[in-house]
Amino acid sequence: MNNQSPENLQEVRAMIQRHKLNDYIFSIIGLLCLMVGLITLLTLFIDLILQGYPKLLSLSFYTDFPSRRASSAGLLSALVGSSLVMLVTFLSAVPMGVMAAIYLEEYAPKNWFSDLIEINVSNLAAVPSIIYGLLALGLFVYILDLGQSIVTAGLTLGLLILPVVIVATRESIRSIPIAIREAAYAVGATKWQVVYDHVIKYSFGGILTGVIIGMARAIGETAPIITIGALTFIAFLPPSPVTTSAPFLNFEWLSSGFTVLPIQMFSWLSRPSEAFHVNAAAAGVIIILVTLIMNGFAIRMRYKMRKNIKW
Amino acid sequence: MMTSTTPVKAEARNLSFFYNGGNNAVKNVSMPLYENKITALIGPSGCGKSTFLRCFNRMHDLYPGNKYDGQIIMHPDNTNILEKNVDPIEVRMRISMVFQKPNPFPKSIYENVAYGLRVRGEKNRRVVDDKVEEALKGAALWNEVKDRLQDLAFNLSGGQQQRLCIARALATDPEIMLFDEPTSALDPIATANIEELMSELRNKLTILVVTHNMQQAARVSDYTAYMYLGELIEHGETDRIFTRPTRKETEDYITGKFG
């Protein structure tokens, strides 16, 4: 085949061109698919901004309580409520999720029982959030008598993102090479020393990413919060967690009534008055921005944490 | 024979090993490790030499279902390190290990070497500093890294990383050091450095090295053991094994007829 005749060469070139056409067609279809999703979301976001910009630009929107008059209604109680609920969510889900994942990966014997737990954890991540709301209503509100409060909402969302935290932590732990663990065991480390000095440290970036993505999901959750009975019209703030006198910490806020951003948005949206829809759009923009910022932060943390780790 | 006068540091007695699932990877091996000597384990891949080596620091205990049979006796205290009531952590504190691929922690050069001391609860900064320097000097790495001890270990070259792993294994003054094909991921120059280092380390401790490279065994070791299909075929002084093997199988492997 060393001496290709000119005709043969022509044929080969034509064939290559035909095959390359497939590349071209696929790349066009792929781009279109990508655009459908991106453009829809972008349109939605821009539409919200255009609708809500008069409110977004006014400072009083962020410092006012809800009101009967659309012009003076603000987000303050929802912003504070969402922040405090997220704080409880973070403090409950992260330690529990991380410790559960470390136990499952490092300590639990591998048998049918741990397999069963593994399947269940993955399934829990797929349970609709309203089911968590029902569970929370029964457990936290009625049995434990925590009331329709910030602590109930925080624990509910904590439960909701627990599987996300567990799965992310386990994946992160699993990505640590066996050679690194063996190196630590070989100098005489105990299991806990390996976990504390290596496993947690090297998987920290991945754990954090999982936590933030879980939190970003939780901050937009509406259904379970409605189920446990969040209020839609709150014209007061919970007691401050930090006080000026000793012991400087105050836990009354935990049992306070509250509202959160998506519920505030929903309540404005369900009003007939057109003016309230501007408020709803502005609240929507804030929720999306918070989520985007959290996700961006997660990506940045992952990049930073992995920079010094090469495997 | 000279072997009868050289003190024995450790010896395997009728050692068998079974992986989870029953695979009998080491079969009834009895073999001494002579003090301050290098013993090389050679044999085709899958012959059980790495499995045998990893019995010496109870590495197999990390994975469930593995089973040892027989004894490994450490001298002079005559401890059977495979016995149930001997803690594998105690064994690993006496017998350290260098792996096939360099596996430094994603920490600083200093912290890599210091880790064995940290695990032992050594808090005194001066003691740790001194030990780290001593270990890095012992691993012939000190001159290359003394000005950048806080740099990440990953920034070192492959050969330097492997010497760092040797320093890490050396920092805790082990009695025996295990090398599991320590140069198989390295270039010829880095390999020569490691081999030279092993020859020097012999003055301080006893070495057991697994190698797939017969020339390496001939170059560095004092004793050589040939394993095949989990069995010890022949063990003796390296010079004799390579010039006058008593078993036909050993001769075939060494001359390249087999393997």
Image (cartoon, coloured by chain):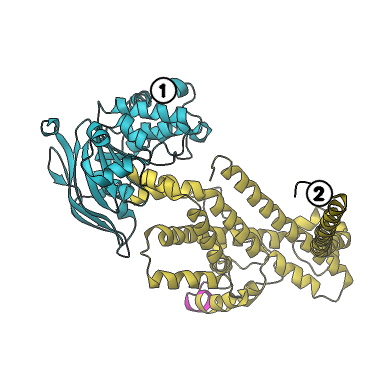
Chain colours: A yellow, B cyan
Mark 2 secondary-structure assignment? loop
Mark 1 secondary-structure assignment? helix
Residue A211 or A67: which is nearer the viewer?
A211
Q: Which residue is mark 1?
A: B142
Q: Is residue B7 left or right of residue B249?
A: left
Residue B220 or A265: which is nearer the viewer?
B220
Indicate yes or no whether the magenta region holds residue A142: yes
- For badge 2, the amino acid type reads Gln
The number of numbered discs placed on residues in the rendered structure image is 2
C-alpha span from label 2 to label 1: 62 Å
- Tell me: residue A119, above or below residue B58: below
- For badge 1, the amino acid type reads Trp
**Is any atom of residue A188 visible in this view?**
no
Which stretch appears magenta? Answer: A140-146
To which chain does the residue with label 1 belong? B
To which chain does the residue with label 2 belong? A
Q: Identify the residue at horizontal 36%, vertical 52% (top origin).
A: B46
Q: Which mark is residue B26?
A: none
Q: Is residue A78 left or right of residue B213?
A: right
Q: Identify the residue at horizontal 52%, vertical 79% (top origin).
A: A138
Q: Is residue A259 left or right of residue B247?
A: right
**Residue B86: image location, x then y, percent:** 19, 50
Dot 2: few (<14), some (14–19), or many (≥20) neighbours within 10 Å?
few
Residue B22 or A32: which is nearer the viewer?
B22
Q: Which residue is mark 2?
A: A4
